[in-house]
Every structure is written in structure tokens, then in C-alpha cells.
Amino acid sequence: MTSPTVATDRPGGTTPGRFRLSLARRRNAELWLFLIPAIAFFALFFLFPLGYGVFMSTTDFTTGTFFTGEAPFVGVDNFVTIFQSPLLGTAIVNTLVITVISVSAELVLGLALALLFTRIFPGSRWLPLLILIPWLLPSVVVATIWKWVLSGDGAFNAVLATLGLPTNAWLADPHTALAFVIVVAVWGSLPYWSTILGAALKQVPEEQLEAAQLDGAGPWQRLIHIVIPNIWPVISVLVVMSVVYSLLIVDLVLVLTSGGPANSTVTLGLLSYRAAFDVFEFGQAGAYGMLLLVLSLAFAALYTWLSTRREKAER
């Protein structure tokens, strides 16, 4: 006598296993539906320009290429040419100096401003909005204004002369031009730093600060041991973004000094610009771009290593 067959099908002939499989497929399809636009955007605006830049850096890509479509493969010749340039060493040093000093100054001054705006004082409501104006202005406009301010007959020298202090054509002096390029870069980015850090400070738990104060911790100790650890993820993102921006700085230097005087403010980004739009050697411009990419990846690797060490230390 055979045992009765147990019915496993649900109404409509769908088994539980098949139902779960169908539901999983639907969820995967929904996930891919949301991911495809992001993947397409990433591929179109990041992977394609990056790949095309690598291609250009290995070819003799000139203005004629736009008409003929021909760009002979030259291998590493473009890299050999840029490494033989007498300006490359100066450009690398200037780029690193601008990046390190400007990002460090933006971090310190931005945090100081953010901490100041957490206090109540006359103008504390509208002043954070007012200082956003420099950041909202295009870099070319900022550089043009500062070029007039720092010129020989500009407002800065007028103030110094009134105070009886020595004046100078600050952007025309090889000894001071780079320093004032950094000052202008910091001035333009500082509002962004203070605004983002100010928002991050509002997320610091008040009870931790009050408990530390009751335990006798001073302002500096509370800043180092409570405030900074709580806002460290925000600081990390800002540092990475600012490093990349500073490494690629072109427009500010181009308007302020054009790399002068005597190439004292030339940067890698400016050399790439000159190669592309002054002598129309787009292959060499691509090679400079690849060098900038290597520097960016080196900073990213350093940041990842330091972040990993910090996470291990906190465990």
C-alpha cells in the first residue's frame, strides 16, 4: 500500500522554494535598477576620462589628431620628455608645499572658526553665512580680486603704507609669491571648512563634554580627547577632498601669477595646462595628469594606512 503523496504546491502551483527564489530575484533586480545609473555615471565621468588620459599619455596626441583621428603610439616618450623638463622638480615641490601648508592651515583655522561659531556673541547668527561668500565666488573671480589687492598700488600696500610698514609687489617677488598664493587658496577654502566642521561639532554629545568638565578637563583636553575623536570622520573626508583639490590647483595660480615670477609658483597642474593649451602637446599634458594621479594615489594610500592604524589603536 503506497503512502499518500503530500501536496507541496501552494495555490497556483508555486512552491515555497520557488517563491523565495522569485522574491530574491526581484530584490536583486531592484538593487541593480538603482545601481545601474550610479555605475553608468561612474564609468562615463570617471573611468572613461581616466582611461582616455592614460591613452593620451602614451600617444603623440596633438591638434592634428582632432582632424585626422590619428595619434601615433609613442610609449613612454611623453614621460621621458616631462621628466627631462627643468621645471618638473620645482613644480612637484611647489605642488606639495601648497597642498601640505594650505590643507594644514585650513584644518586649524577652519576648526578654530567652527569652535568660535558655537559660542553666542553679537553677529554669531549671520557671520557664518557672511563668510561663505568667498567660497561661493568662482576661483577666477577670487584670484582677480586678490591680484589687485596684492599689486604694487593695491589695497594691501595702501594699508601697510598707512601703518608705516614696508610695501612690496608681493606677487611679483619670487620670495613672497608662493606664500601669497597659499594665503589666497586658504582664504577661498576656509569658509567651506568652517561650515562643515561647524555642522559636525553640533553632533558632539553634550553629556560627554559636561562630564569631562566636571572631572576637571580643560578646554584643550576636551578638544583633543572628545571633540576631535567625535568629528574625526568628517575631518578625514575634508582632508582627502582638499588634498585632491590642492594637487590639481590651476586656475588660482594661472590668474594670480601665471606660474611666475621666474617660475617660482609653477605647479604640476599649470605645467599640464601649458602643455595642452600653449604648445598643444596633449600627450605630454596627459603624462603630467598621470603624475598627478600617482601623487593623489600616494596621499590616498597614506591616508588609508593612517586610518587603519588609528582604528587598530582604538580597539
Image (cartoon, helix red, strand yellow):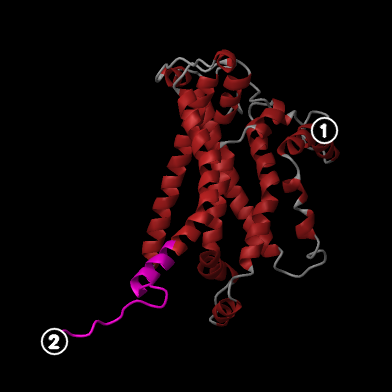
Q: Secondary structure at mark 2?
A: loop
Residue 58, image x and y in percent? 44, 22
Q: Which residue is mark 1?
A: 154
The magenta segment: 2-25
Residue 62, image x and y in percent? 55, 16
The quadrant in which the C terminus is found is bottom left
Look at the numbered discs 1 and 2 and tell me whether their residues touch, using CB distance below 8 Å. Answer: no
Q: Is residue 151 magenta?
A: no
The reply to whether residue 111 is visible in this rendering is: yes
Residue, x 61% and y 35% (percent of image)?
A: 249
- Which residue is at the far front? 1
Q: Is residue 8 magenta?
A: yes
Residue 78, image x and y in percent? 46, 19
Label ID, residue 1: 2
The quadrant in which the N terminus is found is bottom left
Label ID, residue 14: none
- Which residue is at the far left? 1
Q: Quadrant of residue 182?
A: top right
Residue 84, image x and y in percent? 45, 17
Instruction: Identify which residue, 163 or 44, lies in the foreground.
Output: 44
Check disc 1: other Cα within 10 Å, few if <14, some if 14-19, many if 20+: some
Instruction: Identify which residue, 182 or 311, lies in the foreground.
Output: 311
**Mark with earlier residue (1, 2):** 2
Residue, x 41% and y 46% (percent of image)?
A: 301
- The three-letter amino acid code for the residue at tag 1 is Gly
- Is 285 left, or right, of 4 in this rendering? right
